Every structure is written in C-alpha cells, then in structure tokens.
Image (tube, coloured by chain):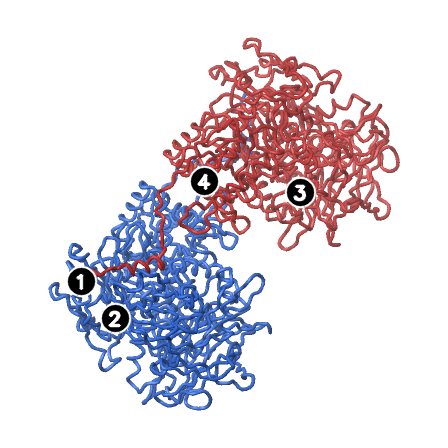
Chain colours: A blue, B red
C-alpha cells in the first residue's frame, strides 16, 4: 500500500486521545500510629439524636424526611458492607436505642457478621448508653439507668465493654458525668465538644483542651478521668472533609482519566488542617471526628474518600493519617505518659458565642421535665414491685418504661429542645409505661372519682420505695363530702377535705378533654387528705368509703366564701421570716390564679428552647388586694415542717402583646451569701457557684442573668455565717442567685421566636381542645426552707430523696371479697430494720437472667453533715430477710463488668503538679460473703449483682 | 413469701410494656406476572445525565455537589450489594458513558459479580448508548456512532444485546429515533415520557399512549416499533413512592414495635395509584418507573421499600406487584397478541404545558452546536484515515474523540440546555480530539500564519471523506500578499486574496486571547482562496509559498474603501429573484457588522435554554444606508452555484436594555406553500409539517410562532406547484414557516431569565478577556437555493452531504525534504470508481479487533427524486481495491449482532386495522461473498463488519 507518512502528520496533529490504562486501585489504609510524626486519628462516626426534630422511630426508619433527612437504618445498613470491604476501616457507634432497633431487624447471619466486626474492633461501641443523655436536665439515677440498659445489652450480645465516654453534643458537661458516668463505669476517657467559647479560646491558647477531670470532691482521685474538649467546639470534620452522600465537600478525585484530578490539592488541605489542630493540641496525636448528625446515610461515601486520603496523605508523608477510634486515640495519649492539667467542677453554663448562654433549656418544657422526673421515681418503685412479684417472662414488664425513660434522658428530650411533636412522642412513650391515673396531677383520677355515695369503696395501696419508714400526707380528689379513710388495721383515721377551687376544676376539664378526648362526667369537689404511714420497701392499704356514721368535725372548710384567690399564711418558720410582704423573705412573685407578677421580657435577640437571653426584667403589680384564704386542718398542722407547694400553677403565659416571656420566681432574704451559691450536679454533688466568675478563666460578663444560671435537679442553696436558705425542686429547672440574699428559679417559658440553634421552632407550648388553644399551664412544686448553718443538708438530702421517690398510689374499686386484705400492709425488709438515713436504694431490679441488680447510694458528701457524712453500712441480710443471697458480685456502675476487673484495667493518668496516689480510704471495703454488710463512703455508689437462691423463695 | 395478689393489681394497672417479639423479616419478592390481575411492573431505574448542571466527571465522582447532589459512583457502588441481597431485585442501567467509567474502577472479582448479575437478568442494560442522546439537535450519524460505541462495549464485556429503547427524558421524539435507533438496532420497544401535553391528554383518554410507531415512509413496516409514552409525562414513580435516600415519601413502616406503622395505608395508596394508571392503559400491565434523575445514591433505600410493597401489596391481593424491567413488561404486552394504534411522523414539538414549547433548545448554544457538527464530520474522516494508516494499538486513537462526540449527543449537551461550565466541558473534550487549528473558523491558524515572506512554505493536505470526487473552494487566512498555490502536480493554480475586514481582525484578537490566553503576534490580512480537486476517500496536496514571480492580476480587491459594512450582491440564481431589497426573496435581516435588524423580544414569561416563548417580533431598521461592497474574483465566479454564507456573523446580541433576544432570519418568497413545509428528522428523512396543525390531535394554538418550530439538522424547504425553496444548515437549528412563502430560522439566542425547566441559569453566553465580557458571537453558514419543483432534493441530499463532510485540512510547515511529496495525491478507492450519487459511506472504521466497520447509507427517500430514489449498488471490491475482503457480515445498525439473528428474534406487533405484511421489496438483497456488491434501497442503511485478509495488505 501507499506510503502514509503524510497521514502520520495528520494523525499526530489531530488525535491526542491518550487513554491512560487504569487498573483497579487498591488503597493502602493499613497505617497505624507512627511515633515520629503528627498522627491524625480519623474517627468515622455518626451522631444520631434519639429524637429531636423528628421522633426516634422517624429517625430510625427515615420517615418525616421533609423535616430532616435522616434515617438511622441507612447508616447501619450501609455501614456493614463498607466495613467488610476493607478490614482497616473502623467505625464507632454510640446510641444503643437506635442500634437495638436495627439489631432486632437483622438476620442471624448478619448478626454473626456484626459480632465479628465488633470482636475485631472494626466496629466499636462508644458511650454505649441508650442515648447520649443530657447533662444538665437529667437526674443521676436516670443517667445510670439508661447507661446500664445500653451497656448490659452490649455485654450480652457482644461480650464487650465500652471504654470511652462520648458526650459530643450535650450543651455543657456535668461533674456527675465525668466521675459517675465516666470513671465509675470504667471509661478511660471522656470526649465532648461544647464548652464555653471563652473557656475554649483560653484552653486552645494554653493547650489545655485535654485535661484530667476530677468530678467529685468526695470521691477523690478515683473520680478522675481523662477528658478532651474538641478543637472547634463541634464534632464535625475539618471544613472540606465532609463526605456525606450528596454533600459538597470536594471529593478526592484521583482518576487521571477524568477531569478535575485534585489529589495534591486535597493532600495539601489535609496537612494544613492537621497542623492547624496540632498547634493547639498537646502531643503528636490529634483526633478528627469524621461525621456528624445522622451522617453515613450511605457509609461508602465517607470511606471511599477516607481510604484515598489515608493512602495519599501517607504517600505524601508530612503527616500520618490513620483509621482510628477514640479508644486507639486514648491509648496513644496514655502511652505518652505525660502529665495533664487538672480540671475540677464542671463545664456549665455553656455559651457558644457572645450573648448566647444555653441556660434556657434548663427550664424549657417544664411539663415534660416534670413528667420525666415523676416517671423516674415511679420506675424505681415499679422495678421493686416487679422483683417482689417475680418478673413475668412472657407478660408485661417494666422494659418499655425503661426504654421510654432512657430515651427521655437524651439531650434533646428532657432538655425541652426538641420540636413539639417529638416532645409529645416522649410523653406518649412514658405514658404507655404509666397507665394509672395519668392525670392525677390535675385532679383527674377516675378510680377515686366513683360516686362513693352508692356504697362503694376504694382500696388505696400506698407504696414506699425508700428504705425508710415514711409518714406523709396523701391527697386524692373525691366527689363526696362524706367519706372515711380506714387504715390497714381497720381503724378509721383522721382525714381532711379541702375544696377544689373552681379555676382548678375548669382547668381540669380543659386538660382532660384535650388529653383524653372527653370531659369527665363528674367533677371531684374536694381534695381528701390523710396521713399515710408506710414501712420501707413496702406498702400500706387504706380504704376510702362513704359512711353515714361519719364525723366531719375534724375537717376545716375554707374560711372565706371566695375560693378564686387562694394562698397560704405560713407561720412557724424557723426564722419567723416566711411571710408574704416585707420581711426577710419576699414573695415577689405570687401566682394568684393566673395573675402573673413577674416576667422576663424577650424582644430583640431571642431566647429560644436552648438559649436564655433576657432583654429586661419586669415586675407585674398584682391587681388590687389579694384576699388571703387560709385552710387549716388537723393534718396540715401536723405536718407544719412541710411547706407545701407555694407556687401552685404557672400559666397560661400571655403572649398577646407579641412578647415571649420567661417566668421566674425570686426569693429574697437577708442572707449575705457574697455572690456564692450552690447547685447540684444531676441531683448528686453540690457545686459551689460564684456569680460573674469562672474558676478556669477570666470571665467576660455580657449576660449578667443568663450567664449566671445553672441547672438544678435537686436544689439550690445559699448561706452565710448563720443561715442556709434551700430550695428543692420536683423537676429540672434553671436557677441562680443574681443578687446577694436572693435565689431565683425559672419556672416556665413561652417564647415566640426560635433562637437559631437547630430546633427551628418557637418554644410555645399550648394545649388545645378543637380550635381553642391556650398556653400550657404548669403545676410544679418548689420546696424551700431556712436552716441554721450546717443543718440544711439533712433536709436537702433526705427530704430530697422523698421528693424523688414519692409514695406510689394504686387504686382499685373494692368489691366484697376485698373488704379485708390478706396482706393489708407489707415490707420487703426486716420489720425491725431500716436503712441508715444517709443511704438510699437507687436500684433494685430483677434482671432477665433472674439475678438481681442492687445499687446503694450514700447520699452525703464529705463534710456535708457532721453526723451523716460518714461511712455507712447496709445489712443485706436484713434488707432481704426472705431471700438467701447465693452470690454477690460488685460491678461497675453500669453493671457490665466486675468492679475489680474494671479497676485493674482502667488507664491511669498523671496530673500536673500532683502525685497520683489513690485515696483508698474514700471507699467502702469488700463485701464479706458471709456477713453481707455493705459499707458506703460519702457519695459512694456501689453496684451489685446478686444471685438469690431461688429454691429458698416461694 | 407473702401473697402478692395486691402487687398483681398494681402491676397490671401500671405496666403495659408489651414488647412484641419480632423475628428477622423475610419479604416475598419472587412474584412474577399473574394473568388475571392488574400487574404493576416496578422498574427500578436511575436517569443519569452525562452532563447537565454538572459535567459528566463531576456527576460520576460526585464533586460540585453544591450545584446538584449527584454521584453516579454511588449509584453503581450501592446497587451491586442491593441486587446481591435478593435475587428477585432488578435494575436497569442506561448511560454507558457512566457505566464504563465505573467499570474501569472495578476489581476483577467485582467484574465477575456484575457479569453474573447481567447474565441472570437482575441487571439489564437498556438503551445502551453512551448517553441518552437528544432527538432534535442530533445528527443521525452521531446517534448511530454513540449508540454503537455503547452497544459494542456491552456486547464485548457481557455478551448481551440491549432490547429496549429508553429515551425517557429527551424533549420530544424523532422519527429517526423510532426506526433507525429503534427498529434498526433490533429494539423490541421504545419508551419515553415527554410528548405534548395536549397529545398526552388525548392519548390517555383514548388509551393510546402505547402505539406501533412507524418512523419512515420509505422503510415501510420494517421501520415499526412498539412505542410507549408514559402516563404522567415524566419518569418518576407515582407520588409518594419515591424512596431516594433523604427524600420524604412515606417509607413503608411495618415494624409494629415502632410507632407510625403504616402498611395498610401504604398498600391502599399503592392500589389506588395502580388503578388510576390502569384506567388509561391498555391491558392488565402497567409500568412504574421507580427512579428518576441520579437516584439510587444509596440503592438500598429503594429496594428496602419496594421489597415491602411487593410483599404487602401481594398479600393484600387486589393488584399484583412485581420487580420488572422494560423487557419483561414488553414481553408481557407482546404476549397478549393485541393490536395497537399506528403512529406516524414524530413527537415534535414538545410542550409540557400551555405556552411552554420546548423549541428554543433547537437553537440554544449555536456555537456548541456548530462545534459538535464540525467534529462529527471530522470524526468520520479521521476514522477513515486511521484505518488507512492502521490503527495504533498503543498510541493515540480516535477513541477519545469518539467518547467526546458521543456524550455531546446527550440531551443536555448539543441541545444547549446545560449550564455554561458544562457546555465548556463538552467543548474542551471535543477540542482534545481536535487540536489542529481550533480557531480556524475565526481566522486564527498559526500554521498558515507564518510569515511566508521569509521563504517558507506551507504544505496543505486536503482530505475528502466522501465517496465522490469533489471540487471545492478552500479558504485559509494568510499574512502575505504575495503567495502562490501549487497543486500536487507542481503546477501553480489560480488563487484569490480577499481582505479580512477590520472587525473580523478585532474579533479574532479578542477570541484568541479569550481562548488561548494571548493575542496572536501577527494578524492575517487576507483570505486566500483556491479551488481544490480531491479524489474520493483521498487527498490532494497543495503548497503555498511566497513568490516574487507572482502575478497579482487575478486578485480583486474591495471596490470600496469602506470595509466595515460588507455584503454580497448575489446574482445568477435560478429564479433570478435572490437579491437584497424588494422581490421574491427579502433579506429582512442582514448582519452588517454588528448592527442587528430583527429580534424577538422576551419579556414576561421568559424564554430559556429549553423553551421558546416570544413576546413579540421587532424589526430593527438599519442605521442609514448600507453601503454594498462587492468582492469579485475568478474563483467565486467559477463556483457561482455555491451561494456562500450570507449571514456572516451574529452577535454580540445586546442586552443593555434588560431584554433577552432571539435572533431569527426570515426568508420571504412568493412560494404558495399553503401552510406546508418540510424539515428533516435528524438529518435523514424529511417530514411534512403543517402550520398550526397536528395529525394526532386537534391542536389548540396558543403560541403561533414557538408552537410551529421544528428541529432542523439538514434543512428546511417549502414548495408550490412550480418551485422549491430550500435552506440547508451547518448545525442544528430551529425553524419554521410562519407565513406562506416564508422560511424562518432561529440563529442565536441571548436570554437573561431562566425558563424554570431545570438548568436554572439564563442562557447568556459571553466571551471574556479578563473582566471584559461580551455576548458570544456566532459565525454560521446557511445555504439557500431555489429549484424547480422536484429538483431540490438532489442539492439538499448531495450538497447536504458535502456540508456535513467538508474537506479536512491539515497543515505543516514544509522543510526542504518535503519539497516534493512522495504521494502528493491519493485515493483509497479504485481511481476509476466513485460511489453512486445516492450513497454515502457514513462509517468506515477499524475496530479494536482489526475488523472493519462499514456503513453505507442511501441518501434518498422513496419518491424523493425521479432518478435517485432507486435501488443503488456499491461495489466493495472497487471501494477497497488494495484489500481483500475475507469475510463480510451484515449486522444490526449498532453492529452488536448479526442482522439475520436480530430479525429473527425481534418481536412483531399487530397494528389496528392493517395486515402485518413485511415490505421486503424495500430492502437490498444479501451480499454475495464473491461479487461483494451491496444493494441499498431508498433510505436504507446497511452495516457490515468486514474481515480483510491482513496478509495481503502492507
């Protein structure tokens, strides 16, 4: 053929279509830690709120995606093949409420696969509770319960024990979290993101983001834990390394056959971000949190890019990138054997920027907060009952209530920072576990409202879940005037009727219609009150009947015909100062049936579910003279030490003026507390607070009110050289002492703006019947008391425990057969025994395998009370007189490992400028299996798994 | 122990925590077709545009997600495990440009897995071209090429042959698609979504969405294909059954342990949607397209829900739901043996609602359209050259150009409906295949711009890719005045210099700077024109040199000193009517160097990239008298039959007045065409169009201009009893005949609003140098001619083919060695042979395995020309005189199966009211392996794979 030289010219010029042959690319992701280099620990994670903008189940199945595109099923479904694709890939999973939902859906084959992944460490459970609980609005017993639920599941299904606390999202961090839910569950470290922005700035400057945190004064160095606050205040990857499906970080494009190849550019960005973080971090290890809320919807998108980053960054060699977990990171830090700064107290309150204190949520949704607290005490008691009866293997158990309470501890649940429909979902779940008299707190209880005039009787079982005998007034609504109360010996006892005010009846009708769908047919007219006396861990039975041979002389009626305004004249206080009007204590705010007297105005930069940002404080003058109506009766006189709920009802808060309001009560006294006040940490330790001051940095005061608010779960007190003023609460609230002598508690919030922190909904709670809505009314109880200096703690601790664990009432309409009870009164304990005043049983529960979980808590801190801040003892043989303890095993707080094993393997950390000696004297000694006496040091909580000899019982 | 009856009361009341034990759920998805029921064929699919809002590579890797969240890698990565999880799950994949990118990335193990899935039918390739090409702005040769590229890949890698046409997104549907890219590639059916909304409404009413479509008059019943237009006009699932990750259709929640269980609700919705569709569909089979653009980012989300729907819907039993594919659906329809309505012509123009004709895109981005067309002809020629030279196994090939051209056929590529940066990407890809003189069309060509006064020479190779000898004027820019042109015999031939006007030089500088980054150092001053004579499939060489013995007498300079306005006085037309000013033909629009004379105004509801929606038509008066400057020369006289580009330059279109404009030219004549005009279908068959009329329904005329626009790739003509007026085009445009005697063509569009059809960007093309931007200028050529009735087709067909395949020029600066060429002229064919006038070689290409792909196309329709609409013959021995044909195998149009095999297995369909007889006389007979003569009937295209005896050649 012809010479084609000329075609060569043409073709060379015109065709440059060089396709580089490409092979299947295998990335080297096997890199471990390299000592000499900066190690970037890439920790693939998702943060899955168990309810927030959507309900937990909506998040799980991925419904209601128009609100938020999130489906946890996707995360876990897509994760497994991604992990299987490369054994170097790792992932941590946190929220067990979601994991358990997923686990139930899996085939046996898939479960085996997952077990393998967990065993190999590719999939690691971190934190391991049912949810990532809040740390401000939660009670420590709930925190323990929900963590235990998750930890025991993990132990049972996978035989592993979570090593790391991972509280990355909660809005501030509590001392109890650090030491109880950290050190005491055996965690080697605790990581979190949100600390005050001023604090973070200083810690970055001084390389003090990572510390040894000692959460308890009483528990000494054993309460220390390695704690790391994240670099940026969030838990996302550095900007540009966010590889969620459909998100827009630049992917690593390493295919030279395609356009936009960018490997060098991405490696450079990686190295720059790593060095930036290294600049404020001690040692050559930094952690990158590769994920955020509900990410890994399609896990492969993250791993695909991380594979490439690890491969090319390590090829580059300036830094070392590796797949890691918080455990690996923690081990690496620990291996350095360095000393770390010591951190005390807690990380409250949290501000994410100037004028943005997240202290509003301490009070947001007070109804939900109250419901959670009520259910918490109820659940404690219900498990006791379940144990005594014997756990029903096939029938109803307390498990659903356990689950509901667990997820209610989530940092967007009890916090009140969820959307309204999600708050409703939590309440619905709680109500399923609590079907009895759900509306008792607004005087609606069908079981006691039968018309007793027809000759019927009501049997009322009053259960006491505390280890002490208790004597307390019980109050129930009744229709009839002529009723008697008979105690368990058959003797008619003193009782007292108090009329229910009209406003309460109207409120009751409205709420009953709103919640139940119909108005009750009969209205109770009276509160029937009598004094119940109940043995420890036991019950007493009372019978209420209409009798014609009934003596009414003991009952005192209202002195005034006007029943609209109602208040109490309180006398007999120890200072003689509790009164309305001028004096040592001023009740500046007084709820007189819907007339509010004080509110805080929110106008410009808005308060919202999270943030408290008052614009001004306004006192509302009561309209005219408030008539005083005094109810006196034999019972109330008898219980004169108990100052009953003085704030009866808050709400509806008016917003007709277009202004959201936050209702606070200020209690003023002459106590010279010199800026100092005390609030509890999750209902446990009291921490000293100093107004306009932080121990860790030089506080810039921009919000003199919101910035001094702290969470309260048990109480708040102030003191001077002579006197203590204590206020205890029935639910979590926010409070402070804004001026000397003053205690302030926020009661309720109704807001009309969102504060831009995510929930995207104004906190404006209403109750509706058909189209008629009004602001939610809150009924809560706050208890206050003056004591001489040094004597307040007895009341705060012991009465505080009774607030947490009120009598549990069960009603039944009594038929003839029930006229006489076979067991009208009962105590599980030795009748002659009672727990010491400084110890409470905080858990008593039959586990699925028939063993029994027991937790005993010392209620006093070191030095708190001159008598009770001492080693206490509990005689288990007398607590369980009818059962034989076969074996008893002390465990970690979450009952997923033996205590000794936990202590042996826990990492130890050196603290700058101190010797690491163990304060062993702060702990009770081992339990002798024969004597079975448990010692408890101040603030100590001990957890046991007891195997009873089942043959002996029945 | 004590009697616990009382605890039973308590526990029964308080604990209702019943957890239903749930097993791992296995869904029954195995359902096939059930004869007695309504069968809902659920077809899981994704529609992946190979460029639109993002570039093809950005879509593939998932970069640039801020524009659109889409990553095809995710689709295919996540698909495979989803298919493996349940063998009943099915999926169709369409766009091979994406699939091939993915395939290259896979391991051998994964490839084997995918082969298995394809073999089993779980994964089916549908359509199978590199892209889902457009049907309006594409040339049939490009459609064939891009389909062949995909089909052959599928055949080679998977040994399967796509059965179904799947043009679901293009904006209207062409006759050529139905018969060439449908019937002729062996498809059993063709499905699409977008037809005129009025048409769809009527077809729904009459159950005529599914038809037998005969796309060609010439090809008879062999051009028929079963064609289905979708129910809703889109290709999504019914509302509420859209299960993309992160989207918000209600998922099927069948876990009774979770809240919001909704199986009954979802089944009811499914059944209702199914019956609704069944009401407008013939037979008991309906198809649900389960997917849409770039869906299945995480495939499991779809399959998870479809599994449940199939399970529960079939449990319900009212309808039958099954995983299906278009093939299964088509077989089910075919098995019914019913008759279907006949559809002729095409589905243009497309309106998706009132006043929304998608006819703007016929012209959008005329520069890109021109570039695609230029590259198309170039690619045809380049493959010929590649064959002659011998395909280079390791070096550069035409493959990249093939790929670039293939994806440029996409319905958001050549259509102009992509974003600007994506249009740039297509152009960049094309330019990589075409590096030679890329800016020749704006007079910039470095190779010819060396200063020949220094004694250098340029060798110019002129290649002719047609099967005929051609004589045509070649025009190149030069700097020097004193040049000679020497032909391949060494003889100086006649040449002519025409000055390049200043405006063009300025434009050239601006564009060169914009595209190349620097202004050319020297400016060409003249167009050098000479007549080249080139043999079929061959080249001739010309040498251009500066000579001092040069005679300038032949060169005619501009008669006027003013070179700004420039036009031609055309004479010698057959009607004597082509002139400027009053007469049979009025050039109402005349581009006189930037002064525009006619535009269409878009103000309220906006035109956009897709939609043409004129608000009014405005003629702009030329400013003052336009001086006529006539260039006359010996060559132009010689080629008087060639009416050169009469519109030299359009743009920049001014938008300073805030009004977008669409520039049209109207050619007015006295031809009484009585509303009838003819436009081509993808450059192939001419279809009769009738103004304000549709054959298939009673047209409601709302847009008298836009609604009468049709796509033009070859040309448009009108005729009356005496005369034909034809206009041929050099790229795809939109055109019409809005008034009798008139032909209108839209030349350019510059718009400042988006039309809300997806691209979300105003079609406002600019060219910038640094910060200086101006509207894009378009240089295009439109050719017009008057012929006596019946004689226009010869010009339209033969000259039309020359427009498509212009001479290919290659330049080289000649050194001494090259003074005399060894092969100054060459033809691959027998020197004494030429193809008949009615046949073109549309493909001649060496395949990877060394065989040769040959396509021959008859260029005339039945009855189109009295001489040429007859059976034609091609003597292959004379086409390939230097090669021995070892074997020749006729194949389907896309060369992925033998023709006979294809014909045997293709489904046949009955047409209502007609007998299904095969018009076998419309086809050429089998090729005798000895004689090797190919017969071609009118409009027939025959495809062959030829195995040459390679030993003979060299």
Give the chain letter at badge 1: A
Callout 3 and callout 1 share a chain? no
Give the chain letter at badge 2: A
At 25% from the left and 70% from the top, the residue drawn is A536
Name the residue carrying label 1.
A882
Instruction: Indicate which disc residue A535 carries.
Output: 2
Q: Is residue A770 left or right of residue A201?
A: right
Nearer to us in this view, A472 or B223: A472
Secondary structure under badge 3?
A: loop
Q: Residue furthest top?
A: B930
Q: Is residue B512 above or below residue B410?
A: below
Give the chain letter at badge 4: B
Residue B780 picture location, percent across and down: 71, 38
The image quarter containing residue B820 is top right
Name the residue carrying label 3.
B610
Question: Are circles 4 and 1 on residues that touch, CB within 8 Å?
Answer: no
């Amino acid at each position: 053929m012809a010479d084609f030289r000329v075609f060569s010219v043409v073709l060379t010029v015109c065709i440059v279509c060089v396709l580089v042959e490409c092979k299947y690319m295998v990335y080297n992701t096997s890199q471990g830690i390299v000592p000499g280099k900066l190690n970037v620990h890439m920790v693939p994670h998702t943060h899955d709120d168990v309810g927030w903008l959507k309900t937990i189940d909506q998040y799980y199945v991925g419904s209601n995606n128009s609100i938020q595109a999130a489906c946890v099923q996707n995360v876990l479904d897509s994760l497994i093949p991604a992990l299987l694709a490369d054994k170097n890939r790792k992932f941590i999973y946190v929220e067990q409420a979601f994991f358990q939902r997923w686990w139930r859906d899996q085939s046996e084959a898939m479960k085996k696969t997952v077990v393998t992944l967990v065993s190999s460490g590719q999939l690691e459970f971190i934190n391991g509770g049912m949810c990532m609980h809040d740390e401000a609005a939660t009670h420590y017993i709930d925190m323990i319960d929900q963590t235990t639920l998750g930890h025991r599941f993990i132990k049972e299904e996978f035989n592993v024990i979570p090593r790391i606390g991972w509280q990355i999202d909660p809005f501030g961090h509590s001392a109890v979290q650090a030491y109880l839910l950290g050190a005491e569950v055996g965690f080697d470290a605790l990581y979190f993101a949100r600390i005050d922005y001023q604090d973070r700035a200083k810690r970055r400057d001084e390389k003090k983001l990572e510390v040894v945190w000692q959460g308890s004064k009483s528990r000494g160095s054993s309460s220390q834990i390695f704690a790391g606050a994240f670099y940026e205040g969030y838990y996302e990857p550095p900007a540009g390394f966010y590889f969620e499906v459909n998100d827009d970080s630049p992917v690593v494009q390493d295919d030279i056959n395609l356009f936009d190849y960018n490997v060098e550019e991405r490696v450079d960005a990686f190295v720059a971000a790593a060095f930036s973080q290294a600049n404020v971090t001690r040692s050559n290890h930094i952690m990158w949190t590769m994920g955020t809320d509900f990410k890994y919807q399609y896990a492969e998108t993250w791993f695909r890019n991380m594979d490439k980053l690890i491969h090319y960054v390590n090829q580059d060699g300036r830094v070392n990138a590796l797949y890691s977990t918080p455990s690996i990171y923690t081990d690496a830090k620990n291996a350095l054997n360095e000393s770390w700064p010591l951190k005390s107290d807690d990380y409250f309150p949290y501000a994410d920027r100037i004028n943005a204190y997240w202290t509003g949520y301490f009070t947001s949704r007070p109804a939900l907060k109250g419901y959670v607290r009520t259910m918490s005490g109820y659940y404690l008691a219900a498990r006791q009952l379940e144990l005594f009866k014997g756990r029903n293997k096939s029938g109803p158990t307390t498990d659903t209530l356990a689950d509901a309470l667990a997820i209610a501890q989530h940092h967007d649940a009890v916090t009140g920072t969820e959307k309204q429909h999600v708050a409703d979902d939590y309440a619905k779940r709680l109500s399923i576990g609590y079907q009895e008299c759900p509306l008792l707190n607004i005087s609606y209880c069908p079981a006691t409202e039968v018309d007793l005039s027809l000759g019927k009787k009501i049997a009322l079982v009053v259960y006491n879940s505390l280890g002490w005998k208790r004597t307390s007034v019980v109050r129930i609504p009744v229709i009839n005037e002529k009723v008697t109360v008979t105690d368990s010996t058959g003797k008619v006892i003193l009782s007292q009727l108090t009329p229910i005010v009209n406003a309460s009846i109207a409120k009751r009708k409205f709420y009953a219609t709103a919640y139940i769908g119909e108005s009750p047919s009969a209205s109770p007219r009276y509160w029937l009150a009598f004094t119940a006396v109940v043995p420890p861990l036991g019950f007493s039975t009372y019978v209420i009947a209409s009798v014609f041979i009934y003596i009414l002389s003991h009952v005192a009626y209202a002195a005034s015909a006007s029943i609209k305004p109602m208040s109490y004249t309180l006398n007999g206080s120890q200072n003689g100062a509790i009164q309305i009007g001028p004096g040592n204590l001023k009740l500046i705010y007084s709820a007189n049936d819907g007339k509010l007297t004080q509110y805080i105005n929110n106008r410009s930069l808005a308060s919202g579910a999270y943030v408290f940002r008052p614009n001004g404080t306004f006192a509302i003058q009561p309209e005219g003279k408030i008539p005083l109506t005094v109810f006196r009766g034999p019972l109330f006189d008898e219980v004169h030490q108990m100052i009953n709920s003085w704030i009866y009802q808050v709400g509806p808060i008016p917003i007709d003026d277009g202004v959201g309001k936050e209702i606070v009560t200020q209690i003023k006294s002459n106590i010279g507390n010199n800026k100092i006040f005390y609030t509890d940490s999750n209902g446990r330790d009291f921490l000293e607070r100093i107004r306009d001051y932080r121990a860790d940095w030089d506080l810039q005061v921009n919000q003199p009110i919101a910035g001094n608010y702290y969470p309260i779960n048990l109480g708040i007190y102030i003191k001077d050289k002579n006197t203590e003023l204590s206020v205890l609460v029935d639910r979590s609230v926010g409070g402070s002492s804004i001026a000397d002598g003053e205690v302030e508690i926020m009661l309720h919030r109704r807001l009309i703006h969102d504060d831009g922190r995510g929930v995207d909904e104004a906190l404006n709670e209403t109750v509706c019947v058909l189209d008629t809505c009004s602001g939610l009314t809150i009924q809560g109880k706050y208890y206050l008391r003056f004591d001489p200096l040094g004597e307040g703690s007895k009341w705060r601790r012991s009465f505080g425990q009774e607030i947490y664990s009120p009598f549990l009432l069960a009603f039944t309409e009594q038929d003839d057969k029930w006229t006489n009870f076979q067991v009208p009164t009962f105590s599980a304990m030795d009748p002659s025994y009672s727990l010491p005043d400084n110890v409470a049983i905080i858990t008593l529960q039959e586990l699925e395998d028939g063993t029994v979980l027991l937790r005993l808590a010392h209620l006093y801190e070191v030095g708190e009370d001159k008598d009770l801040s001492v080693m206490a003892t509990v005689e288990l043989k007398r607590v369980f007189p009818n059962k034989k303890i076969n074996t008893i095993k002390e465990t970690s707080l979450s009952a997923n490992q033996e205590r000794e094993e936990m202590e042996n393997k826990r990492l130890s950390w050196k603290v700058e400028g101190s010797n690491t000696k163990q304060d062993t004297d702060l702990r009770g000694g081992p339990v002798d299996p024969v004597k079975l006496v448990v010692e408890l040091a101040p603030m100590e909580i001990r957890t046991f798994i007891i195997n009873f000899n089942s043959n002996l019982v029945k």
